[in-house]
Amino acid sequence: MSTPFDPTKRFLIKGIAAACLLSVARVGFAATAQIVAVRVWPSSTYTRITLESNVRLSYKQFLLTNPNRLVIDIDDLNLNGTFRNITALVQPQDPYIKQLRVGQFDHKTVRLVIELAQSVNPNLFTLSPIAEFKNRLVIDLYPQMPSAADDDPLFALLQEFNKGELGDDEPTVSPMPKKLNDKVIIVLDPGHGGEDPGAIGYYKTREKDIVLQIARRLRDLIKKEKDMIAHMTRNEDVFLPLRVRVEKARTLHADLFISIHADAFTKRSARGSSVFALSTKGASSSAASYLAQTQNEADEIGGVSRSGDRYLDHTLLDLVQTTTTSNSLVLGKEILTQMKRVNTLHKSLVESAGFAVLKAPDVPSVLVETAFISNINEEKKLKTANFQNQVAKAILDGIKNYIKLRKN
């Protein structure tokens, strides 16, 4: 296992946990390619395999049938113990992988064979080093025939994203039919996931796990409200690009978008809850600006083959954007008022910065930092069902108050 990550560095590099590393080889200054870590992230939407190496990997891929297999030949590589251990990472519930095999195909080629549980559309790409990650070869396995629920546009959005076609003013995926009722549609966004664990606490608590638990609790509370409907951007440990999260809210005709986080800082004394809204004209403080910068790095940390920010590359409809921004601030204020009842506030006012995940031009959106996971006492609280329920109820009460005050 790798050395535990120091959470005091978390605010600066936004999270790389060693939680799923099988082993890390000593690389030294060798010029030849060497695998230093392997990870497998199964989910119902897609399964990701990550091969981390000291240098950029050169590879070839091809699909075989009877049985269905994806074969990947990696050039100029010698098989080591770290790579061999990938065979033990397959989980019984993985919907896309039956078995992994790896061997030295010839003196300079390692062959990885992925025996598939169903027909897939593979998406392979490489990522340059970032933070504590070295070079990565990413293998995403998407189903050819998705079995996702009809009312969840996630798979279609991921398809568009992988084609580089997601992010225009209007959703590229056809919006779901608007239900003929007056219910408020709320999209909950648990931050991070999959390859990106988010902040790591002193006791190795991972942000991605805590915020998913809080989001589920909030979803369950919303289900009890007769005038509200709750959706989640993710309901499992899966990496989703920031733009996909935004577009899912738009495609679902969301009335509100709430991104849930638990951040860290270099000083363990930092504590308290905060709420942030979007600003396209500069941050409200240097701390808010830096937090937005680190949050926006989630795409690179989690592994995105294409990036960019088309929302800032053109002028949005002023009337729509003005109303959205105004409602976001009202929503943020009401949630912050309720959070004050369950935790100390880090900032007493709603702050704003250029958070990529808040950039739906037509959906009021806020980012809630529930507490500092780098603070030992707050980390302990975040792990408890009692505090998670209190946070969920505070957010819901803030939503209720906002609905009475929002501008149409």
Image (spheres, rainbow, N blue to C red):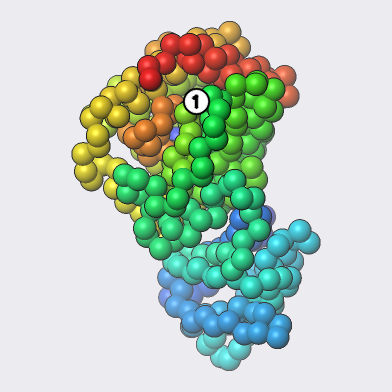
Q: Residue furthest left?
A: 315
Q: Dividing the image into 4 quarters, which one contains the C terminus?
A: top left
Q: Residue furthest right?
A: 92
**Residue 59 visible in the displayed image:** yes
**Residue 10 visible in the displayed image:** no
Left/right placement of residue 104 relative to residue 313 reads right
Q: Quadrant of residue 42?
A: bottom right
Total tally of numbered discs in the picture: 1
Instruction: Name above or below for residue 224 compared with residue 120.
Output: above
Instruction: Name above or below for residue 24 compared with residue 276.
Output: below
Q: Dividing the image into 4 quarters, which one contains the N terminus?
A: bottom right
Q: Residue furthest front?
A: 180
- The residue tagged 1 is 368
What residue is at 48 percent from the left and 60 percent from the top?
Answer: 159
What residue is at 48 percent from the left and 11 percent from the top?
Answer: 404
What residue is at 58 percent from the left and 38 percent from the top?
Answer: 232
Residue sitting nearer the eye, 26 or 375: 375
**For the residue labelled by badge 1, is the local secondary structure a helix, a strand or a loop?**
strand
Q: Residues within 10 Å of mark 1 (few under 14, many from 20)?
A: many
Q: Percent position (x, y) of residue 238?
A: 59, 50
Instruction: Name above or below for residue 268 compared with residue 83.
Output: above
Q: Percent position (x, y) of residue 29?
A: 44, 69
Left/right placement of residue 42 relative to residue 77 reads right
Residue sitting nearer the eye, 69 or 146: 146
What residue is at 66 percent from the left and 58 percent from the top?
Answer: 147
Q: Amino acid at mark 1?
A: Val
Q: Percent position (x, y) of residue 406?
A: 42, 16
Q: Percent position (x, y) of residue 46?
A: 60, 59
